[in-house]
Image (tube, rainbow, N blue to C red):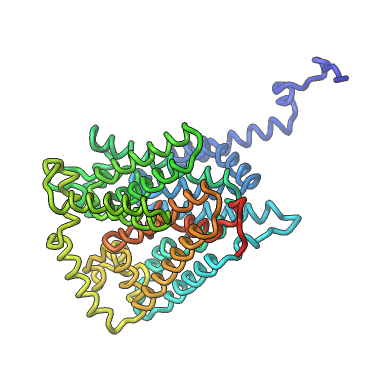
Amino acid sequence: MEREVNQFEVSTGSDRLRSPKYLLFLLLVTAVSVWVISHLGFTGAISLILLPFVFLYLFLLFRWPISGLWTSLILGFVLLGVARYVSADIQIGLFMDLSLVLTYIALIFKNFYGKTDWSPAKKDVTLLAAIWFGYSLLQFFNPEVKSYAAWFSGVRGISLYMMMIIPLVLLFIDSKRKLRIFFFIWGAFSILASLKGILQMTLGTDPWEQLWLATPAGQTHIIFGNLRAFSFMSDAGQFGANQAYSAVMGIIVAFSEKKRKNQLFFILVAVLGIVGMFISGTRGAISIPLGAAILFVIMRKSRGILIAGIVLLALTFFFFKFTYIGQDNQFIRRMRTAFNPNDPSLQVRLENQKKLSTYLSSRPFGGGIGHAGVKAKAFTPGSYLSTVATDSWYVLIWAEQGIIGLILHLAILFYILIKGAYLIMYRIKDRELRLKMMALASGMFGVMVASYGNAVLGTMPTSLLIYSSMALMLSPEKLDRKEIKS
């Protein structure tokens, strides 16, 4: 029988204030708040408002460390776009580093009195990530390095995040429910990204985005007076490629879902993803669904699907290459130039690659991480590599880490893709899981193809999604209830 509460014995908030220790604590909090606001102004006031939410997040993180992985994926979508709204002095990218480090700390403290089971992370994909990260660390001693700040800035996106994300995915995503959460987070932010891009095209850009469009990086987003949507991502190239990538994921995952509402959600992801791809004006992004379709029909091992896929690809190629249907639409017109081998932009890229070939012929380890592409203009202006546009992800790797780095990078990518495709085709027996893994493998191959024309593979959020896909593709056995041992 429950004990009845005597209302006269209940201690209220006003009663506690009579206690000297509570009153002293309240006065101390008030004094600190006044000092912070008086010295930091509006920024200090906002910080104080956010402080309770920070403590709440840390509580949830240390209670459920997997929330750190979800946070990192979300930050991957919005972080670079948020940089347009904050002071240039704030290194916004460090929030990703902090999120990942805190996740590992939370994981260790979660099992502080026990022993953390690292065995799920002991996979060949983790070893490959460690090898690639190790090579990037050795680049610190590259004699061509002129700025160690450039190396630090570049190595994070090239290999550090890969080294940190893959073990977390292997440790945390160990059930179909968690795999579904991964896809829903991806899909939800892809939808938001497309909606933001549509708003930019219909209502225009906000004042902060207008300022960014006036910068050298932003000026490429206005072509013949027409805006290339970039949403809340780093640029239109990343926006278009990631939305095409999300469209591939959405349409394949939709077929794997049994519930109608889930199917409709992922179909919406696919439709808005295609819309986002077109309004970005990113021509190379169209190679993502085309490349993904090729691998998908191969993995399906169905003659009917193979024939249908070949016909669809042929019709798509014929539409863009040999017809002028929809030529009055600026987005279709721009996409069509991707199928023109004489396109001036392509010729400029080929010419730049010839220049780099001469420069790199005596530099097998490249010119140093962070010393080519956009980062070179920021960290080493005036250097030779800062004057030659890399554009392609593979050309960037070649320029920064040499032919040795490029070969190693491609070997890792193809090993993961080929082994992943093999496991999907011959080891996974659960249809739902097989289709989800096909979505990851097909999307990864599409991104790999598109990365020849744009540096999309190593930029957030695509990079984090690719690294997560690598881990999931090479460890499907823990998710497959009908596993057949090798």
Taking 134 as reference, is 241 above or below it? above
The answer to whether residue 81 is left or right of residue 72 is left
User: Residue placed at 35% from the left, 67% from the top?
Assistant: 370
Q: Nearer the viewer, residue 153 or 110?
A: 110
Query: Which of the 4 image quarters holds residue 448?
Result: bottom left
Which x, y percent locates residue 398? Answer: 32, 72
Which x, y percent locates residue 6? Answer: 83, 16
Look at the image and tell me whether residue 365 can be seen. yes
Q: Nearer the viewer, residue 445 or 352?
A: 445
Query: Which of the 4 image quarters holds residue 188?
Result: top left
Taking 410 as reference, is 271 above or below it? above
The answer to whether residue 7 is left or right of residue 451 is right
User: Residue placed at 39% from the left, 70% from the top?
Assistant: 410
Give the residue at the far front of this rendering.
303
Give the residue at the far bottom of this rendering.
362
The answer to whether residue 242 is left or right of residue 475 is left
Taking 461 as reference, is 52 above or below it? above
User: Residue placed at 48% from the left, 53% from the top?
Assistant: 437
Which x, y percent locates residue 213? Answer: 23, 47
Q: Nearer the viewer, residue 108 or 124?
A: 124
Q: Quadrant of the N terminus?
A: top right
The answer to whether residue 99 is left or right of residue 8 is left
Give the residue at the far top of this rendering.
7
Look at the image and tell me whether residue 87 can be seen. no
